[in-house]
């Protein structure tokens, strides 16, 4: 005989997977773009005020060796969402350009990949991405949305499919200025002059037609490049709501405010729903072009950059306050990170410093020195995670995938290699050691360095197979190319590898030698062997960042009006007038 009493009794006996009252937890995952670990109060900055983020760390767990799987946006985000090294999904470039810079390119996160959003959606979660995506959009026509967040499990999307760039804001210059800086104008002019001189003096004879043809070709090429730069904002800086382009190009000024109110509305909607939720809040900031809404401008000691960090912190505060107001704090795991280190080469056209700070760590974005990959890692979940705990074990942004999937009660796909590890035992204090004995640091598709945290040892060895050529003296690193490249001509190879022990030399200041480290040879041997075994396990896949997948394909161009109107759409109507800085419930 079945009686409800027996069921109730059984319910008592069965161990609850989590403390009572917690069914499926909610998730708010916050990613800032290009934020330096040294920009935050809780990571040692005493002059830039980030009280809300500091509070998250104080009431939660702070990771001090939290590592982005790549020092660049597109691959780092691919790894974060899939829990896999980006090379496994083809999201790691073999050439210079490691990220998407054109919205009408055909590359993107392949459909075969499982994101945690897709898995959670299948578990009944409400899922939303607010902010930056940067993992592709279309494959074959301008609205197939094969790489759109919706195709990867995000029901709701409000944000930009590409990335924020200098070109997206009038007066902030152009990222293509760097291309222009590489055009050898002097050589071009000298060649032309020599050519005309030789022709004029009769040394060589060139038909008038050929000469004119060449000049015309040059003019057309320059004009096309000029046109490309001029129209770039219209074609690439647009805002989408769901699958619709709602503002093209977007007006940045109050955008963080608008995204914040969108997030608050999403959280409020969950009140009338019995479904748990996943919110991925992915800031456009603090990537250039920097913008801060009027109430934050001029408020920090660090120019527009500092103002922007303060606005980011304010948004985090608004999200926490909303969770508090809706009595969701104990049911929600909040995570905050940055996709990589600060972009040290970012100096504005007027010479203003537009970069973050990597604290005591060496270099920044686009390098695998600690400054490029050691990012903030804060986990906050009152009642489930200890408050004020600091963990110095190596962890990765790929660990979020298995942690979130397990907490949601789903199973981790077992038909593929997942590189992340469930962090909950470490965060809750059940274990002391990270499961990552080895971590592999890629510069695009090139295996750049290995990290080894041997069992029974406090050492954290890091061996570089090559390092970027850069000028750290004035803090601008790879100034000439605006970012460090991983390819021949821009790097120095090391054989034997350049070895550091981060437990003794956090700033990677002095490489070890067989004299300073008696075990040098045996340590390097172990690491080289680990790299070999790891590399053997990488299966070849379609390169989603090949030239063909990065280029502008006009038939993929999203356009909210007509091409003759240059795709302009003045405002996001659904969000009402733009001329209001969103006022959010004061507490
Ligand atoms: C705080 O952050 C700002 C902005 O990145 C940086 O310029 C400054 O040096 C940092 N201050 C400290 C004490 O770390
Ligand atoms: C060293 O690590 C191994 C696992 O790798 C473990 O079995 C052993 O107990 C450890 N020894 C000590 C002394 O911690
Ligand atoms: C930094 O140093 C490099 C190399 O010496 C130089 O080319 C570059 O102009 C410098 N940048 C600034 C902003 O001074
Ligand atoms: C380093 O050398 C010491 C002493 O010879 C030895 O006990 C230890 O196991 C070595 N460590 C490694 C990582 O090889
Ligand atoms: C941003 O908000 C402020 C304050 O409400 C307003 O004055 C300003 O016009 C807005 N900017 C834009 C571009 O809408």
Image (cartoon, grey):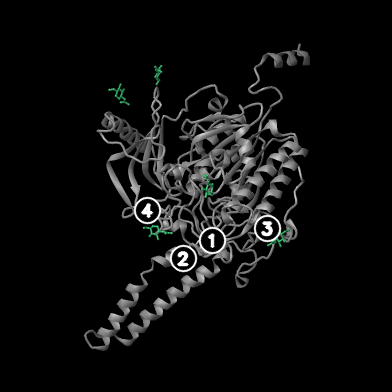
User: Of residues 208 and 169, which is closer to you in this image?
Assistant: 169
Give the alpha-carbon distance from disc 1 to disc 4, as whole Å: 23 Å
Mark 1 crowdedness (10 Å alpha carbons): few <14, some 14-19, many ≥20 = many
Circle 1 is placed at which residue position?
Answer: 166
In the image, taking residue 92 as reference, residue 318 lies left or right, namely right
Element type at marker 1? helix
| Residue 422 shows in this picture | no
Q: Is mark 2 within 8 Å of ligand 3?
A: no
Which quadrant contains ligand 4? top left
Which of the two discs, 2 and 1, labels the residue nearer the N terminus?
1
In the structure shown, which secondary structural element does the residue marked by tag 4 occupy? loop
Asked if one can make out residue 115 in the rendered structure from this viewpoint, the answer is yes
Q: Quadrant of the N terminus?
A: top right
Residue annotated with mark 4 = 471
- How far is disc 2 from disc 1 in space, using C-alphas? 10 Å
Q: Are marks 2 and 1 in contact (CB under 8 Å)?
A: yes
Residue under numbered circle 2: 177
Instruction: Indicate which disc, 3 or 2, sits on the residue closer to the N terminus.
Output: 2
Q: Quadrant of residue 185?
A: bottom left
Q: Earlier in the sequence, mark 2 or mark 4?
A: 2
| Label 3 CB sits under 8 Å from any ligand 5 atom | yes
The numbered mark, 4 or 3, whose residue comes first in the sequence reads: 3
Residue highlighted by disc 3: 294
Q: Position of residue 97 (x, y in %)?
A: 43, 55
**Residue 493 image offset from top left, x and y in percent:** 29, 46
Q: Secondary structure at mark 3?
A: helix
Residue found 30% across the figure and 40% down from its top: 497
Q: Nearer the viewer, residue 70 or 420?
A: 70
Q: Nearer the viewer, mark 1 or mark 4?
A: 4
Task: Tell me: 388 left or right of 10.
Answer: left
For the residues labelled 3 and 2, the Cα–Cα distance comes to 28 Å
| Nearer mark to the viewer, of 3 and 1 | 3
């Amino acid at each position: 005989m079945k009686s409800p009493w027996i069921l109730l009794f059984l319910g008592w006996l069965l161990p609850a997977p989590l403390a009572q009252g917690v069914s499926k937890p909610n998730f708010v995952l916050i990613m800032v773009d290009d934020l330096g670990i040294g920009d935050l109060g809780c990571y040692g900055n005493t002059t830039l005020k980030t009280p809300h983020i500091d509070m998250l760390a104080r009431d939660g767990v702070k990771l001090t060796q939290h590592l982005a799987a790549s020092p660049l946006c597109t691959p780092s985000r691919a790894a974060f969402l899939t829990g896999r090294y980006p090379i496994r999904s083809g999201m790691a470039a073999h050439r210079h350009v490691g990220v998407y810079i054109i919205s009408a390119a055909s590359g993107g996160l392949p459909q075969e990949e499982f994101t945690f959003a897709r898995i959670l959606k299948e578990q009944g979660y409400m899922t939303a991405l607010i902010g930056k995506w940067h993992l592709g959009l279309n494959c074959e026509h301008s609205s197939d949305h094969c790489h759109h967040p919706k195709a990867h499990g995000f029901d709701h999307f409000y944000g930009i499919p590409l990335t924020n760039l200098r070109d997206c804001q009038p007066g902030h210059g152009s990222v293509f200025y760097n291309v222009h800086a590489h055009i050898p104008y002097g050589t071009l002019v000298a060649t032309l002059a020599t050519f005309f001189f030789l022709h004029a003096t009769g040394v060589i004879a060139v038909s008038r037609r050929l000469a004119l043809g060449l000049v015309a070709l040059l003019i057309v090429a320059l004009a096309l490049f000029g046109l490309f730069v001029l129209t770039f904002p219209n074609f690439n800086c647009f805002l989408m709501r769901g699958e619709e382009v709602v503002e093209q190009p977007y007006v940045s000024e109050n955008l963080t405010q608008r995204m914040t109110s969108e997030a608050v509305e999403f959280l409020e909607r969950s009140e009338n729903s019995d479904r748990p939720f996943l919110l991925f809040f992915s800031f456009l900031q603090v990537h250039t072009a920097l913008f801060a809404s009027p109430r934050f401008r001029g408020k920090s000691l660090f120019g527009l950059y500092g103002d922007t960090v303060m606005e980011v912190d304010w948004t985090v505060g608004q999200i926490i306050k909303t969770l508090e107001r809706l009595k969701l704090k104990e049911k929600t795991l909040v995570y905050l990170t940055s996709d990589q280190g600060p972009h040290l080469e970012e100096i504005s056209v007027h010479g203003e410093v537009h970069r973050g700070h990597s604290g005591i760590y060496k270099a920044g974005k686009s390098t695998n020195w600690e400054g490029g990959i050691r990012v903030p890692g804060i986990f906050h979940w009152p009642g489930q995670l200890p408050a004020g705990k600091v963990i110095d074990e190596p962890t990765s942004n790929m660990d979020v995938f298995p942690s979130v999937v397990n907490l949601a009660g789903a199973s981790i796909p077992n038909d593929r290699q997942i590189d992340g590890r469930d962090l909950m035992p470490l965060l809750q204090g059940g274990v002391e050691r990270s499961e990552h004995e080895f971590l592999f640091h890629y510069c695009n598709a090139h295996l750049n360095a290995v990290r080894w945290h041997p069992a029974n040892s406090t050492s954290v060895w890091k061996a570089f197979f090559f390092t970027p050529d850069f000028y750290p003296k004035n803090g601008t690193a790879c100034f000439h190319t605006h970012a460090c490249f991983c390819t021949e001509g821009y790097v120095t190879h090391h054989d034997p590898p350049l070895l550091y022990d981060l437990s003794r030399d956090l700033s990677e200041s002095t490489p070890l030698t067989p004299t300073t480290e008696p075990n040098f040879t045996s340590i390097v041997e172990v690491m080289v062997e680990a790299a070999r075994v790891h590399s053997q396990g990488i299966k070849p896949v379609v390169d989603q960042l090949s030239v063909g997948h990065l280029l502008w394909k006009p038939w993929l161009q999203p356009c909210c009006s007509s091409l003759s109107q240059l795709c302009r759409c003045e405002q996001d109507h659904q969000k009402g007038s733009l001329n209001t800085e969103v006022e959010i419930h004061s507490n």
